Amino acid sequence: MNTESKFAELKEKEREARKQIIIDSALALFAKKAFYEVGMRDVADEAGVSPATLYRYFPSQEDLFVEAFIQDISAVSLEFENMVKKEQPATIEECAITYVDHLFQNDSTFQMMTYILLKDHLDKAALAKFGSVTRIFFDIFEQLLRRYGTKEDVRLYVHAFIAAMTGIIITFRNHPVKKKGEIREHILQITRITADLFSNKLIK
């Protein structure tokens, strides 16, 4: 590798390091306050960069949020993959509980996800990145259903499953008459019931 190539590689590594600092700063802020309260200037201040520098790395707020979401969800994605690839794969209920409880316990992740899902006219690049993450989850759950013998309309059932799990959280996460601990137990109870319905339908 010549000197010019080494210099270009070093610059790219430095760029990626700065980009990671910005993402980590965004995630740190999301852990302190509600997702919708965090602005780009807040992230720039946390990362110790100017807003202009921040926008060089992330052209839009949505682009930053998607990158942060992807990193935040990567660990649970790997966990799902390991659960499915075990010699004796996890049950549908175990996967459902893992998915729902992660989103319930990590409110910023859930807020980012719903923001991206519900926002009109989302930046195309951000939408494409988000789509790549959702496909990973769909693929993992599809592998699980196929391992349990489901052969027809598998992708359709995967979509129904993910939508049902996400809908449970949306419906009950702000239950007006229950405390947070009670809400979690209520959500997990409904998750088990829903997972059981899928299991009875799909497992041969």
Image (cartoon, rainbow, N blue to C red):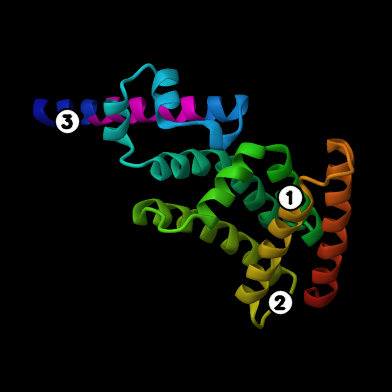
Provide the secondary structure element on which disc 2 rests. Answer: loop
Provide the secondary structure element on which disc 1 rests. Answer: helix
Residue 196 vertical placement versus 70 (above, below): below
Label 2 Cα neighbours within 10 Å, binned few <14 / some 14-19 / many ≥20: some
For residue 166, which numbered disc appears in the image?
Answer: none
Which sits earlier in the primary sequence, circle 3 or circle 1?
A: 3
Residue 21 in view here: no
Q: What stretch of residues is rendered in magenta? A: 12-26
Q: Position of residue 16 (x, y in %)?
A: 33, 31
Question: Residue 25 in magenta?
Answer: yes
Q: Position of residue 104 (x, y in %)?
A: 73, 43
- On the image, numbered disc 2 is attached to which residue? 150
**Three-letter residue code for mark 1:** Val
Provide the secondary structure element on which disc 3 rests. Answer: helix
Would you say 129 lies left or right of 81 here?
left
Q: Residue at x 49, y 54 (%)?
A: 119
Which sits earlier in the primary sequence, circle 3 or circle 2?
A: 3
**Three-letter residue code for mark 2:** Thr
- On the image, numbered disc 1 is attached to which residue? 100
- On the image, numbered disc 3 is attached to which residue? 8
Residue 15 vertical placement versus 139 (above, below): above
CA distance for labels 1 and 2: 22 Å
Question: Residue 177 in magenta?
Answer: no
CA distance for labels 3 and 1: 43 Å
Depth check: 13 or 29 in front? 29
Closest to the camera, between mark 3 and mark 1, is 1
Would you say 94 lies left or right of 135 here?
right
Magenta residues, dominant SS class: helix
Q: Residue at x 88, y 49 (%)?
A: 186
Q: Residue at x 42, y 45 (%)?
A: 62
